[in-house]
Image (cartoon, rainbow, N blue to C red):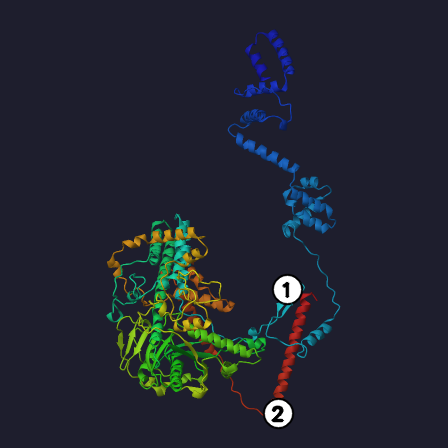
Amino acid sequence: MIWIGKRETTYPGKHTGTSQETCSQDWLEAQRTPREKLNKAMEILGSSFQPLQSQLQKPWNSISNSMRSYYSKKAFECVEIVLSIIAPDQECFLLESIYKKFSKTQEMCEIDQTTKTIINAYNNVTDSRTQTQILSLIVNSFTKAELQKLIPGVSLFKIDSARKHALVTGPGHIINKPKVYRMKLSKPKLTHFIEFIMNPLYSSVVGFGQTVLKLSSNEKYLSRKILKVCHASKQRALQGLDNITAAGMNSIDMLSKLVQKLETFGMSQPESLTDIIQLINQFLKYEYKSHLNRLDGCTDHCTTMALSDPTEPKFSASCNHNHERQCEKCAMVESCLDMINEKINQIEIPTTILEEMKFEMEMAEKHLMEWKKHLLRTVHQESARRNILKSLTSKQALVIMDWAMKFLPFQYRETQSEFFGKKGFSWHISCVITSSKENELDLQCYIHILENGTQGWFSVANILVNLLDQLKTVNPDIDELFLKSDNAACYHCTNLLSFIQQNNAIFPILIKEYNFSEAQSGKDLCDSKTGTSRLHIYKYANEGHNVVSSADMKIALDSHGGIRGTQVSIISVNQDDEPHAKVKIPGISMLNNFTFGGEAITARKAYEVGEGLMIKTSTDPHLSMECVYKMKVVQPFPGPNEQPAKGTVTIPITRNDTDGIDNTCNNEEQRPIEPVADVNSNESDTEYNMPYFCCPDDSCDKVFAKSCNLEMHLTIGNHNYRTNPVSCLDTAVQIYAGQCESVLSYNETLVHCTSEDQHNINMGEINEKGGWALKGKRLTARFSESVKKYLQNICISCEKTGTRPNYYQLSEELRKVTDENGQKMFVKKEWLTPSQIRGYVAQFISKSRANITASKVPRVELCEVSVDEDEKLSAIVNMLDVNELNSDVSSIVTEVFSSVGI
């Protein structure tokens, strides 16, 4: 019509011609096919449209791909032209809206298989409650009209009920019918039954299991715990032992977390650093001990140089060799730390997070290096025992002392109330090694069971004097004694060392040396004897005996002929007699080896390193023999004629003096015990399938055919810390026939890359590392009041809930906790390490318990009563017990009836 109007407007003066043309035009329009009409319309709407050549008459699946492409292209052009006219410059949005509406229509026409299954389940169920539960699964996915089309016969009320069910309880949630209980027993009958079953004649309380009452609502009711009524008195190890190794292993995890944090801030290739950290962990755990030697040219391996104090000539020793060699694996530790520090300084990190990361890096670096120093001191200090045993004569003895873990009273049959609240017995182990004949070592163990007293220096001094008297009685030929123990406070203290020096001349046996082991080492022989003795006691108790006193412990240890080479005594030490000495040895915590002379003590920081410092102790009357040795021997050791058999093993001991650490293991003739297999042995006929016993020390590579040889090897401590040409990973590679060759080459590349910068260190810098493994002085700092208050609140909360605080989480919490304004509560100088938090918590709890003990009402003294009064008292007690039983039964019945709604 628009075109016709234009024609009329163009020729207004020719009326007759225009009418004829209009009729002919209408006739032409009626004769045109739909294809022609489409082409004409598209020509009018878009001039660039090419006419449609043909109309599709065949099925779509039967035409060729070219024809499909042609018709699809023409259809898209038509749609695009129409959309550009309806919505200029917004064709995409309009097309997307049409497509969504078309897709929804298709989805309505074709529902998925899951919906069909739900609809079939709905139709197959006749219960109305179940139908509502099933319908609630799909009720929110369709409208009401759509649901009525999908499920014929469903009512609007049913749809509303299903939507309410889905909103209140969740789609498909099962609602059980309410249960109706009908009680057929009256309350008096129920009370009588409960009173009957609780009669002690028919039931008894046992020491195992826990009574649980389960109600019909699945609620569980636990019977009262004995500890809630009678609190057990037990001590918790809040501080524990020296945790240098644990802190070092924790620093490995801390470094791995730092690398992960650096990765989040854009550090590239974090996998290489992570692999290096794991290599350092494996190296320090298993390989570093085997690298150490007193005659090594590497500064990280030479123990003499590492433990020589450059500031004190008396604690320093010179080496007869040059330190020109360098170990790539040892240098990997320092180079890895330098790489992480460099990454932290290069990457852009927010200030608050950067401060925390630098603090964590400082702590990790400190603990990792302390772990490395600890391993070196451990190996070096163990050389004292080996050297003493190699040169031990028939007139000398080596004594290794240690307190065993307290033994808790044990009964063959005990109730639950008897199981809790036990108080353990202290017992002291003294292992004496002598050389009675040539090439023979005798092992004798003396156990002192402490009936009264504490594990302090005063008890150790009394035990030591008693042990010297016993040794002189049994073996009069012994004239000199070497002492060895760990560095616990009861041994490594001024009072004990001053007492030995002051009274050494009047002792029956002269004490020549006292060597202290590094923390967590040097007690393997005592621990072995402790485990054997403990199992012997349990064996006696399992035969139907009770071990509830120190006398029972002695009987158990002496049962079945006793333990070979073990003697037992019971002593009592009155702590009120402990003298208060005023003698002091400056820097005693740094000194580990003491030689007792006539006038002074020669002290060294490391075994046979330097000439030592002469310390003259003043004579203190409080440390005289008369003031200290006041213990009471309840049951003595067996007499000289009643001695048990000794543990004697013939061992070919080499008398050649070595350098302290065993460097003669490469000579097969000088080995104390011939092993079955050697990790570094080149023999191919080694039988790995036969029974053998390996040394429990990870760095020792000796293997034995008999358990007795392994025991004597542990007694001597002559470990084969030989430098292996391959690592533990390399050994695994050899065993599994090259399956891990790619891993090995990758690790070697990492080690080479991290340590290549270390080769550029000049010799002047190397020589300055003398004394790097010595113990450093711990700097003490006062905690701020805000930190104390924060930790005190946590301690009070833990005491109420009974939970134990996590010191590592608390340390991290102090660095991140903020106030109401979002500012950090504590600055960097107020941040604490886990060990500092552990020490403060232990001190706070001990003070709290001391205050509670002091505020308790003193006990009432018991007085003797007559027989008549005692009978009346028994009757009153019985009546009180009956009333308490009735009250408990009544409360239980009330709770049962209230739970069931009566």
* Label 1 sits on residue: 219
Relative to the observer, which residue lies in front, 833 or 677? 677
**Can the viewer see residue 262 in this picture?**
no
Q: Quick check: 16 left or right of 638? A: right
Q: Eyeballing the image, is 422 above or below 287?
A: below
Relative to the observer, which residue lies in front, 93 or 615? 615
Q: Eyeballing the image, is 176 above or below 779?
A: above
**Residue 148: x percent and y percent?**
70, 41
* Label 2 sits on residue: 868
The residue at the far right in this view is 184
Q: Secondary structure at mark 2?
A: helix
Q: Eyeballing the image, is 6 above or below 160?
A: above
Q: Residue at left 34%, top 70%?
A: 383
Q: Secondary structure at mark 1?
A: loop
Q: Quick check: 227 left or right of 745? A: right
Corner quadrant of residue 468: bottom left
Within 10 angstroms of label 2, few (less than 14), some, or many (20 or more) residues?
few
Q: Quick check: 182 left or right of 45? A: right
**Residue 813: x percent and y percent?**
43, 60
Task: Tell me the kind of residue under disc 1.
Answer: Glu
Mark sitting earlier along the chain (2/1): 1
Q: Residue at left 67%, top 68%?
A: 896
Which label belongs to residue 795? none
